[in-house]
Image: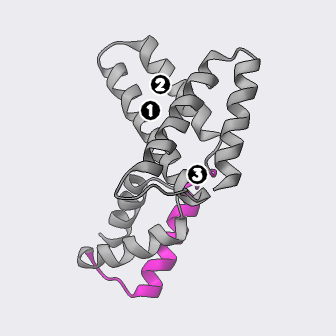
Amino acid sequence: MPGLKDRLRTDLTTAMKGRDELSTATLRMVLSAVSAEEVAGKEARQLSDDDVMVVLRREAKKRREAAEAFADAGRAEQAERERAEEGVIAAYLPAQLADADLAAIVADVVTRTGASGMRDMGKVMGAVQGAVAGRAEGGRVAAEVRRQLA
């Protein structure tokens, strides 16, 4: 746990000292989500860096979905704020795979598993998700798997 969570706290302090309102608000929200995750369930626990990454990905996805909803509702200012918050969170996430890299990983898994059609999608998805390890959204992965199995 110490690594990423401590980095978030240190960056929050830096943002507060620099009077960076966007980063301050976003990092507070992320740390709050991390704390909530730590006390969720039957027992309180310390989150590992991987667990904190899961929370960060979830929060980034929330921002992306909120930005789309605001944009669809004609509220451009709020949509831009959500995109900016997602940008702050994205700095802590691993870089996303390019489409070509994702296609190569899926093709390799399809070959290794011997998948021949859509009935094998679950088997392929499980292996691909393990290989991409958070570097591609589930929707992108599923779309590529469908494209290659069809």
The label number, if any, that marks residue 96 in the structure image: 3
- Give whichever of discs 1 and 3 has the lower sequence position: 1
Answer with the quarter of the image where residue 61 lies.
top left
Counting from the top left corner in percent of width and height, residue 113 is at 41, 86
- Give whichever of discs 2 and 3 has the lower sequence position: 2
Answer with the quarter of the image where residue 85 lies.
top right
Q: Kindly identify which residue carries mark 2.
A: 82
Q: Are marks 1 and 3 in contact (CB under 8 Å)?
A: no
Q: Kindly identify which residue carries mark 1.
A: 63
SS for callout 3? loop
Residue at 55% x, 37% y: name it.
31
Residue at 58% x, 51% y: name it.
96
Name the kind of residue labelled 3 in the image.
Answer: Gln
Q: Is residue 139 magenta?
A: no
Name the kind of residue labelled 1 in the image.
Answer: Arg
In front: label 2 or label 3: 2
Counting from the top left corner in percent of width and height, residue 39 is at 43, 49
Q: Is residue 124 left or right of residue 133?
A: left
SS for callout 1? helix
Looking at the rendering, the stretch of residues picked out in magenta corresponds to: 94-117
Q: Are marks 2 and 1 in contact (CB under 8 Å)?
A: yes
- The answer to whether residue 77 is above or below residue 114 is above
Disc 1 crowd, CA 10 A, few/some/many (<14, 14-19, 20+): many
Q: How is the image coloured?
A: one colour
- In depth, the one of 18 and 81 nearer the eye is 18
Counting from the top left corner in percent of width and height, residue 20 is at 68, 17
Picture quarter with the C terminus: bottom left
- The answer to whether residue 9 is above or below residue 100 is above
Disc 3 crowd, CA 10 A, few/some/many (<14, 14-19, 20+): some
- The overriding secondary structure of the stretch rendered in magenta is helix
- The residues bearing labels 2 and 1 have C-alpha atoms spaced at a distance of 5 Å
SS for callout 2? helix
